[in-house]
Image: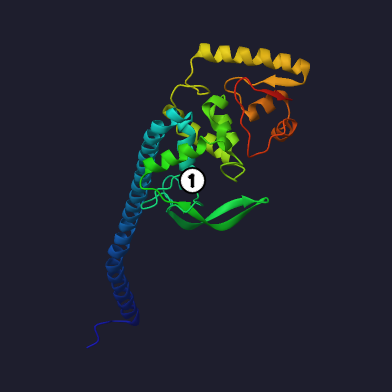
Amino acid sequence: MNQFKSRIEKYNYMKQQQKEQRMKVAKRTVPLLGTAMILSPVAISMNTVKVSAAETAQTQNQSAFIEQLGASAMQVSSSNDLYASIMVAQALVETGFGSSQLSSAPYYNLFGVKEYSGGPSVTMSTQEYLNGQWVTMNEPFAVYNSYAESFQAHATLLTGNYYAGARKSHTNSYQDAAVYLTGRYATDPSYASKLISLIQTYNLTRFDTPGAGTAVQTTSTQTTTTTTTTSTTTATQSSGQTYTVQSGDSIWGIAEQFGVSVDQLMADNGWSSDSVTIMPGDTISI
């Protein structure tokens, strides 16, 4: 028996059935889409927390590393006429904040010191700035038993005549020492700016002990030193011939005072880059 009285009723019935079927499909689909929309933000949030935690841990590790370096630097710097701030900054540059393989156990080489005398060493690749470009080379690096031993060896190296211009007694500040080491300790032309930036960013001067050339000196001492240097400089500029080296002077600082290049000053006095050592009381030609 035909339940529809007309074709129109049959057509309307079929349309209603199709609509109900689509609604059933839609109801089964919506929860799945809703679940995906809810889970996505949670996943993003979890990832963000992980990255933040990693960054926090890295910062904490770097701070601990700096404090560890500072403690070792203070032990050897004061007795060797050196800036602890410079030593710590050098270690940070050379090791990439302790991330380099050479600075880790079992090598403990914090300063990229090379070994050519037959002592314990390990060969690793390194980049050197030669003839205006970076060159990768394989070099033998010294191996130490601890960070303390690495610092002591570094202090012994810096107190040699070749690095005399980096001592406290031969400089007015750690900036002078950083400039002096550039081209001597490291071939990187931006070495000084890197050291100075690290010292200022992480307040590394807090590891420096009072002494000639340090920023820890009292105001009265600094004023006296400045007055003496100024009067001597004025007299020398008038004569244009000689200058008497004062305590805290450096080759770079003297050259800057008289408006000449370091190379010119060295040439005027017959100095070579391997034997530059000035002491208070020395008379040099300008």
Q: Where is residue 133 in the image (x, y as percent from the top left)?
A: 65, 52
Q: Residue visible at 41% across and 34% down? A: 73
Q: In this view, does 53 lie above or below 36?
A: above
Q: Is mark 1 on a helix, strand or loop?
A: helix
Residue assigned mark 1: 94
Q: In which quarter of the image is residue 258?
A: top right
Left/right of residue 270 with respect to residue 28 in the rendered view = right
Task: Tell me the quadrant of the picture where the N terminus can be found.
Answer: bottom left
Q: Where is residue 72 in the image (x, y as percent from the top left)?
A: 38, 36
Task: Tell me the quadrant of the picture where the C terminus can be found.
Answer: top right
Q: Nearer the viewer, residue 167 or 62?
A: 167
Q: In which quarter of the image is residue 10?
A: bottom left
Q: Which of 257 and 23 is in front in this view?
A: 257
Which amino acid type is marked by label 1?
Glu
Left/right of residue 258 with respect to residue 183 in the rendered view = right
Q: Residue visible at 47% across and 32% down? A: 85
Left/right of residue 99 with respect to residue 249 in the rendered view = left
Residue 90 visible? The answer is yes
